[in-house]
Amino acid sequence: MNARPAPARILGIDTSCDDTGVGVVELAPDGGVRVLANRVWSQTVHANYGGVMPELASREHVERIDAVTGDALAEAGLTVQDVDVVAATSGPGLVGALLVGLMYGKGLAQALGVPFHAAHHLEGHIYAAASEAELRPPYLALVVSGGHTHLFDVPREGEYVLVGATRDDAAGEAFDKVARLAGLGYPGGPAISEAARRGDPDAVPFKEPLKGQKGFDFSFSGLKTAALLAHRAGANPEDLAAGFERAAVNFLLGTTLRAAQAYGRNTVVVSGGVAANRALREAFAASPVRAVFPGQGLNTDNGAMIALAGAAALRAGRPPSPLSEGAVAYAPLANA
């Protein structure tokens, strides 16, 4: 009698920005995936500057990555010898930060004699949500984070058509900047969300960005300018937060719903750090589309999502990446 195929344990690493993330997932022979561990070291030094300092981020990754990897393996109940595949983010992101995880992952794969897969950061975000519901295409994918605001149509597994993108700041970046000018702290997403609970969204008016556009792009420069003018006029910070959050959420939701109708999609994957926003989740939950969000701990940058992207590569039969794969600051995901 033939032995049953063993599941593959994939270790994923993400150091694309200011979070050192290492996760472990298990890919079953039938294609199902299970997250075994997800450990993230979130850097706090950047709060002193109101934004990410690339050189400091790279140094902290170097200092933390070995310990975070050990913690992830311990959480999964595995030793490093149990790892069958290593995946690491190659881009997009801060090149210096990316290189830390990428080189660590390559070295680990080479030392263990196992395949290595270079993963796309945005694909990792998408799989962080899609795997939660064992989702299969077609669907739309909205990736909203501190560095990205992209809307993709996903007609087939591994195929991404760019539908819309931000023309200026990413959504999370706009949250950070508005939180900073209102004196609400860093990171801006949680700070805005908490302050908005206590504010009046009607007290500070915000106009709808890109009103009347035929496409599905995003822009947050107008909302930032309105927030700045309101702040200078003495607006209450909590009212400012409430008005900005509502305007940003309505803009993200409205644009995505128009795209869903245009492309005939009934399901939308919403991922990235901004996907943790309570108001955004509630708005999508009340919308006519089926919205799928990442599970707990998988919204912000993390290693488990990269392991999930590695599992998808294995499931699709993609060959391992060459060890010459480099870090790329700008790496479009769209391939159609």
Image: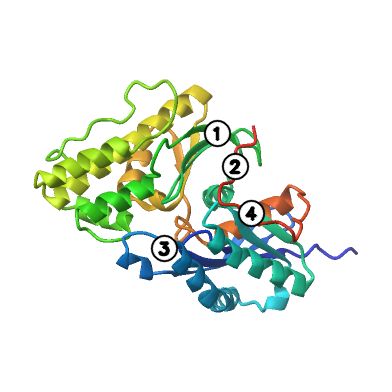
Residue 18: quarter of image: bottom left
- Marks 1/2 in contact by CB < 8 Å: the verdict is yes
Q: Is mark 2 on a helix, strand or loop?
A: loop
Q: Disc count in the image?
A: 4
Q: Which residue lies furthest to the left in this view?
A: 234
- Marks 1/3 in contact by CB < 8 Å: the verdict is no
Picture residue at 41% right of the left edge, 51% below the top: 146
Whichever of labels 4 and 1 marks the residue nearer the N terminus, that label is: 4
Amino acid type, label 1:
Leu
Q: Distance between the residues labelled 4 and 1?
A: 18 Å
Instruction: State the residue position of label 2.
Output: 333
Picture residue at 68% right of the left edge, 77% below the top: 80
- Marks 3/4 in contact by CB < 8 Å: the verdict is no
Whichever of labels 2 and 4 marks the residue nearer the N terminus, that label is: 4
- 3 or 2: mark nearer the eye: 3
- Marks 4/1 in contact by CB < 8 Å: the verdict is no
Residue 72: quarter of image: bottom right
Picture residue at 31% right of the left edge, 67% below the top: 48
Instruction: State the residue position of label 4.
Output: 119
Amino acid type, label 2:
Leu
Amino acid type, label 3:
Met
Left or right: residue 212 compared with residue 215: left
Whichever of labels 3 and 4 marks the residue nearer the N terminus, that label is: 3
Q: Tell me how the rendering is colored.
A: rainbow
Instruction: State the residue position of label 3.
Output: 53
Q: Distance between the residues labelled 3 and 4?
A: 23 Å
| Mark 2 surroundings within 10 Å by alpha-carbon count, few (fewer than 14), some (14 through 19), many (20 or more) | some
Instruction: State the residue position of label 1.
Output: 162
Q: Can residue 24 be seen in this view?
A: no
